[in-house]
Amino acid sequence: MPQLDTSTWFTTIMSMLITLFIMLQLAISKYTYTQNPELKSKKMMNHKNPWEIKWTKIYSPHSLPL
């Protein structure tokens, strides 16, 4: 029964890891990020919900007439 030759495994695995690292770096470098992220003002984020615009009366079950 022949022996399995593992002498080239280290070179193969290391070259695979280096290649994957380079490909990951190239993929990440394609993204652009803003240099100075700024907070949005609260006035821009404020919006009215439908239940805030019109008046609605909420009845509590305990306050209803019997």
Image (tube, helix red, strand yellow):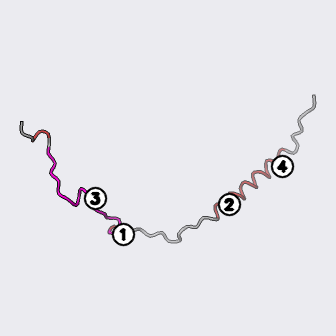
Under tag 3, what secondary structure? loop
The answer to whether marks 4 and 3 mark residues whose Cβ atoms lie closer than 8 Å is no
The answer to whether marks 1 and 2 mark residues whose Cβ atoms lie closer than 8 Å is no
Q: Nearer the viewer, residue 8 or 66?
A: 66
Residue 41, by quadrant, is: bottom left
- Which of pointers 2 and 4 lies earlier in the amino acid sequence? 4
Residue 55, by quadrant, is: bottom left
Label 3: how many Cα within 10 Å (few below 14, some 14–19, many 20+):
few
* Depicted 25 relative to depicted 12: above or below: below
Please name which of the two marks, 4 or 3, marks the residue nearer to the observer: 3
The answer to whether marks 2 and 4 mark residues whose Cβ atoms lie closer than 8 Å is no
Q: Quadrant of the N terminus?
A: top right
Q: Nearer the viewer, residue 62 or 65?
A: 65
Which disc, if any, is residue 25? 2
* Callout 4 amino acid: Thr
Q: Is residue 61 left or right of residue 3?
A: left
Residue at left 58%, top 67%?
32
CA distance for labels 4 and 3 = 63 Å
Q: Is residue 24 left or right of residue 64?
A: right
CA distance for labels 1 and 3 = 19 Å
Q: Is residue 48 left or right of residue 24?
A: left
Boundaries of the magenta span: 43-59
Residue where numbered disc 1 is placed: 41
Residue 51, by quadrant, is: bottom left
Under tag 1, what secondary structure? loop
Residue at left 31%, top 64%?
46
CA distance for labels 4 and 1 = 55 Å
